[in-house]
Amino acid sequence: MNESVMSNESEAGVPAASWTDAGVSNRSLALSPSSPDVPVNPWDIMLCLSGTVIACENAIVVAIIFYTPTLRTPMFVLIGSLATADLLAGMGLILNFVFQYLISSETISLITVGFLVASFTASISSLLAITVDRYFSLYNALTYLSEKTLHFVHLMVVGTWGASLCLGLLPVLGWNCLDDVASCSIVRPLKRSNVTLLAVSFFVIFVVMLGLYFKICKIVCRHAHQIALQQHFFTSSHYVATKKGVSTLAIILGTFGASWLPFAIYCLVGEREYPAVYTYATLLPATYNSMINPIIYAYRNTEIQRSLYALFCGCFQTVSYRSRSPSEV
């Protein structure tokens, strides 16, 4: 994501400054091809490295869920959707870096922008779908594993990806500022109206998730109280379990908000003339959410841990077996 100077005095191109100089002149972060003479921006390197880590983490999760027949429950379908979205987001960050500095093409730039918008939108929407699923798994615990629930989960996945693809196609289909620089947002070539739509959509999702997690906390506390009444006393283990569950929900929602809220707020208040370092400083933490997601939703799950352990043990055993020479047998 190179830096392009939005100067009112001259239309001549100015070489991109380093990230320490980003606050000196007015410029906007641009998801568009750089000229061959522009040096590599350190912020873009960090985004590319972040994308690499994201892609590697989530590729493992996708592979485990895809190749493990027992992981076909509604919960793992949604986790797989989240991991796929984050995997594509990581790949998009890598491809954006490659296309930006190696292949100069406005068409490829627009496709990359749409790809990133669709991927991150699918990631955020998948988090909402997981929250809805967790709420219904507690609210309708007796009928949660029914065919109706699985059908509902599939509909949520289709709706999530359908809406994300539509938002990702908007810049490609013409909702961009390539022909109208004055309408550009803090992320070129997205229009300010486009970025505003994405930011408002995020706030709606965040508020819905906040309300659902509040209801989940109430259900968890009520269940713990009912168990305590049945046993005629509230043991310390019940208190610890309830506190741990509420703390986990707070960590999940807090991580999500801390990652995306700064960038979403800046999308609403930022102008294209503002230094690009502000956009980078808020966008980079947003990508960390896709890095943390597999740790929270996948690697902490005992079934995925078991599958991961079996996968690595099988690989090591295969390598050990194949490395034997005839004299060792």
Image: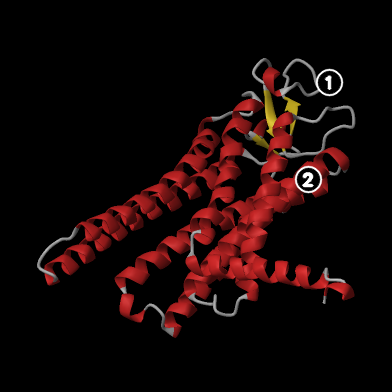
Q: Nearer the viewer, residue 225 or 188?
A: 225
Task: Please report the residue visible at 64 percent of the width from the left and 29 percent of the height from the top.
Answer: 272
Residue 8 lies, in percent from the top left, at: 72, 18
Name the residue type under label 1.
Ala
User: Vertical placement of 19 versus 62: above or below?
Assistant: above
Task: Please report the residue visible at 40 percent of the width from the left and 48 percent of the height from the top.
Answer: 251
Side (left or right) of 115 relative to 202: right
Q: Residue furthest bottom?
A: 147
Instruction: Give whichever of discs 1 and 2 has the lower sequence position.
Output: 1
User: Vertical placement of 14 versus 215: above or below?
Assistant: above
Task: Please report the residue visible at 70 percent of the width from the left and 44 percent of the height from the top.
Answer: 176
Q: Nearer the viewer, mark 1 or mark 2?
A: 2
**Tags 1 and 2 touching, CB below 8 Å:** no
Name the residue type under label 2.
Ser
The residue beneath circle 2 is: 109
Q: Is residue 282 visible?
A: yes
Residue 212 lies, in percent from the top left, at: 35, 58
Q: Callout 1: helix, strand or loop? A: loop
The residue beneath circle 1 is: 12
User: Vertical placement of 233 versus 96: above or below?
Assistant: below
Residue 24 lies, in percent from the top left, at: 67, 15
Side (left or right) of 323 relative to 231: right
Residue 302 lies, in percent from the top left, at: 48, 66
> Of the numbered discs in the image, which one, if any, rests on residue 32?
none
Q: Quadrant of the C terminus?
A: bottom right
Mark 1 vs mark 2, CA separation in Å: 21 Å
Q: Nearer the viewer, residue 156 or 314?
A: 314
Image quadrant assignment for residue 6: top right
